[in-house]
Amino acid sequence: MKLELDVTFDLNFSLSCGQIFRFRKQNDWWYGLSEENIFKIRQIDRCLEFEGVDVSFIKTFFGLNDDLTKIAHEINKDAYIASAIEQFEGLRLIRQNPWECLSSFICATYKNIAAIEQTLLKMSQKHGEPHCFEGQTFWLFPSAEKLAKVSVQSLEECGLGYRAKYVQATAKRVWEEQIDLEEFKQLPYVEAKRHLLEFLGVGLKVADCVLLFSLEKMEAFPVDIWIKRILLNHYTDHLPYDLVEHLKNHDSLSNGEYEKLGTFARNYFGPYAGYAQEYIYHYERSKKQVTHY
């Protein structure tokens, strides 16, 4: 199938910026999975070619209904982010499945992107369902029910390490309490975040990643060590002096410091602060070849 684009979009930027982990590129095609959908997609100029899903799925999944012109205008507050927007024009936030996104980012803490991809692949191969697509075998992401019933040791063997008990406990709670993560989309950002933080293994950054990448909370602004450095290198004039001095002398972030940086970003960049985060994160990573998230 084909879709002629009437909006700005860059497939490669959107799939390689660290927001999603279960896509791989073969030649000029990207192969990926979302829920029970296995598909391939490529972009040739302003045309998307794809197989395995329909046009409606593509538009929703890749955020093609987002008004990127308006968003870029809203977040374009200074020369630094202007450069990021210019270099990565067309980068869009993907709408991931909330359960897969939550599990993935619990697994992702303190891992580089390559390691995250391998961990999720091993977990899917061991506990997900195999499906054939174009002569290749793909494994669907295991459901909360499936992971709730496996042992912590089995998850550890997939490379999760100490995160295994978090994934298993979160899966068990989601399944036993019949929690519909999709319903969190209807909640305000602060309330949805509070609910996510109740899951074992979910801290402030993981919660913000899930909110931004799967629950349509575009004001969410995940802060890790790299975003912290970006803010210290380019936005100190907007931050309290005492906070800046403390952050310069400590690598880690306290919860209070994390919240202060997130609050600054939401106030400064506005309701699309999450888009700003993804642009400056990918911009910095492209310059420094950073592979951590």
Image (spheres, rainbow, N blue to C red):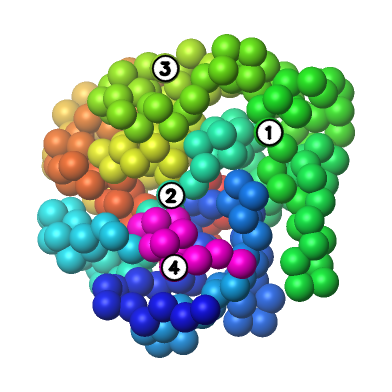
Element assignment for label 3:
helix
Res 234 seen here: yes
First in residue order: circle 2 vs circle 1: 2
Query: Which residue position is annotated with label 2?
Result: 95
Query: Disc 1 versus disc 3: distance between alpha carbons?
Result: 20 Å
Residue found at x 68% / y 51%:
117
Q: Position of residue 95 (x, y in %)?
A: 43, 49
CB-based contact (under 8 Å), mark 2 and mark 1:
no
Identify residue type, mark 2: Arg
Residue 226, relative to residue 30: is it above or below? above
At mark 2, the secondary structure is loop
Q: Which residues are magenta?
A: 52-63
Residue that label 3 marks: 195
Q: Quadrant of residue 7?
A: bottom left
Q: Is residue 62 magenta?
A: yes
- Image quadrant in which you'd find residue 104: top right
Mark nearer the viewer, 4 or 3: 4
Q: In whole angstroms, how far apart are the C-alphas of marks 4 and 3?
A: 33 Å
